Every structure is written in C-alpha cells, then in structure tokens.
Amino acid sequence: MTLKTPILLASVLGALALATSSDARACGYFDYRQIRPVVHVPKPAPIAANVRIANAEQRLDEEHLTAAGAEVVLAFPSIRHVAVGASPLETRALHILSLAVVRGEGSLRGVAGFAGTGATERAANLEWAASTLRALDVARPNDPVTQADLAEALAARPQHEDESLAILADLAGRDLVGSAHAYAALARLQASRGDMDATRAALARCERMTRSPTVVCRAPDGRLAFGG
C-alpha cells in the first residue's frame, strides 16, 4: 500500500461523514439534538391583603358567602385568633367574615377553619361570629350598623333570640335598620312569636333593601308571600 492510500481512505470517510450529517439534517434529526434555552415563567405577584379584603366585601354584597370567607382567610390565615382592634384592616376582615359565617348558617365549605361540617362545628362558628360582632359593637358604641349586625348574629342562636329581638325592634322603631339581612332576622323572630303583621312588614322592608330578595328575605312561614 502506498502513502497515498491512507490519505485517500481518510478523504472518503470524511466525505461519508459529511454526507451522513447532511442526510441527518435533511431528515430532521439535527434540530432534535439542539440545546434549547430554558424559559423561566415568572410567578404571579401575590395579592395584597387590602385587595383581598376589598374583594371579600364585594363577594359578601353579592351573597357569595364562601368566596367572601375564602378571601379573608387567604389574606389573614390566623384571622380566627385575631382580636378586634388589632388593626383597621384586620378588624374590617373580622366584620366581613363574621357576617359571612352567620349568613352561611355556620358553614363556609372549603374555607379553612370555617367549613362547619357538623352541627357542633357550625354552632362553634356561629358563637365565634356573634362574639366577634359583639366586640365590634363594644368598640363602636351606639352605631346602628354594628348593632344590627350583632342582632343578626344573635338571632341565629336560640339562647340569644330575646336580646336580638330587643335590639332589632328598637332599631326598627327608629327606622335605623340598615341591613336587609337584619330585617330578615327580625321577620323570623316576629314570626316565631306569632306576630304575622310585623313579620310581613319586616319582609317588605327586606325586599326593598336587597337585589336578591329570594335569597335574603326568606319567608319564615311558608304561607307568607314575599312582601305579602
């Protein structure tokens, strides 16, 4: 074998390698082996507590009670153990959550700490809400709004019904009940005592104060029509 033979062989092998590489590119295998840059997707910015509480207030107004409660707990996970007056935002959050619990009859399904999956838990949630709203009433004396909210919560517990009726009757007599839910509570209490005329009047006031009368102004007696 002459000296030229290895050189010629190397040239042939090199040409074959180039041809194979070209064929690989043509068949689409080349891109498969390319190193692609990693794309980092930024995490969404956390929602500020004040935004969550504003959302919670809106959800409460819309009668979306579980959504309202969820926003509060996401903003303040330890809210159940926060005292009224700890901060203005937390106090507002306590107010919203307490009303959501009362209007949800002690159960906010899926909301940590307030699911109320059994009768005992629902009763404990309602007592917590009533105690919280009582603390708010003490912090804001002679405020018809907090008085009506407290009375609404008290109406949900049989042992507090007399106190609730006294508060609501006094506010209604002075035309200071500013909540449809409070009027609904007053109607239920009056119906339980057989005062059907007062019950109808309270239901009529309830209807005029809410965009969701069939949800809020539930007649406590099946024979009564809304506003009848």
Image (tube, rainbow, N blue to C red):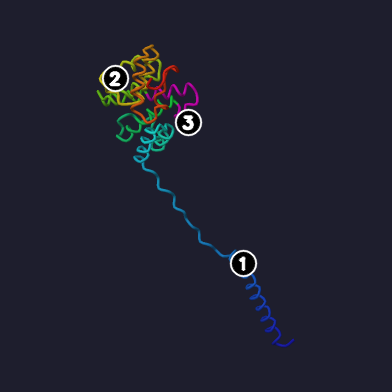
Quarter holding residue 207: top left
Q: Say which element carries label 3.
A: loop
Pointer 3 or 1: first along the chain: 1
Q: Does the stretch in magenta take in 18?
A: no
Q: Say which element carries label 2.
A: helix
Q: Nearer the viewer, residue 218 or 116?
A: 218
**Residue 91 in picture, x, y percent from top left:** 32, 32
Residue type marked 3: Arg
Q: Say which element carries label 1.
A: loop
Which residue carries the number 3 mark? Answer: 109
Residue 172 is tagged as 2
Distance from disc 2 to disc 1, alpha carbons, whole Å, reads 81 Å
Discs 2, 1 touching: Cβ within 8 Å: no
Give the extent of the magenta segment: 107-129
Q: Residue at x 44, y 50 (%)?
A: 43
Mark 3 Cα shell of 10 Å, populated few (<14), some (14-19), many (≥20): some
Q: Residue at x 37, y 33 (%)?
A: 61
**Residue 169 in picture, x, y percent from top left:** 30, 17
**Residue 165 in picture, x, y percent from top left:** 33, 16
